């Protein structure tokens, strides 16, 4: 069953544009190369200039969860100076 990963990012103050560029350079290719990845949308907040919401579509929860933890840590380390916090949750795709 397809799932959506929703991330909320708090960028370092005044560094959102840098965060967006780095995310596109670092995270997007890594996700695109992973089995089960479908698509990614990045939504900078209008109301909160240091916030970003990311929606990643995965073919299944197990494929999302199989993203290598060591690679995730390495990619996160490359973002550390431009982000303060990231939260993530999985959402079920509902077609009721």
Image (cartoon, grey):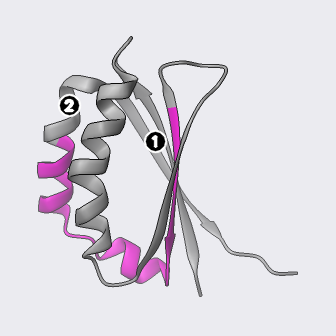
The relative height of residue 55 versus residue 17 in the rendered view (above or below) is: below
- Give the percent coordinates (x, y) of residue 31: 30, 66
Write the residue at 88% across / 81% down: 96
Q: Is 58 a magenta residue? A: yes
Magenta-colored span: 52-76
The relative height of residue 58 versus residue 8 in the rendered view (above or below) is: below
Q: Quadrant of the N terminus?
A: bottom right
- Give the percent coordinates (x, y) of residue 71: 14, 60
Give me the C-alpha separation between circle 1 and circle 2: 14 Å
- Give the percent coordinates (x, y) of residue 7: 49, 47
* Viewer-side label of 1, 2: 2
- Mark closest to the chain's N terminus, 1 or 2: 2
Determine whether the residue tagged by mark 1 lies in a helix, strand or loop: strand
Write the residue at 25% across / 63% down: 29
Mark 1, Cα crowd under 10 Å, few <14 / some 14-19 / many 20+, is: few
- Say which residue label 1 marks: 87
- Say which residue label 2 marks: 80
For the residue pair 76 and 23, the one nearer the viewer reads as: 23
């Amino acid at each position: 069953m397809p799932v959506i990963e929703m991330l909320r990012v708090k960028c370092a103050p005044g560094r959102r544009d840098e965060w967006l560029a780095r995310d596109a350079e670092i995270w997007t290719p890594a996700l695109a190369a992973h089995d089960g990845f479908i698509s990614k949308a990045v939504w900078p907040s209008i109301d909160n200039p240091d916030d970003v919401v990311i929606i990643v579509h995965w073919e299944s929860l197990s494929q999302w969860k199989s993203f290598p933890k060591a690679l995730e840590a390495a990619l996160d380390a490359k973002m550390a100076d431009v982000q303060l916090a990231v939260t993530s949750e999985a959402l079920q795709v509902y077609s009721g």
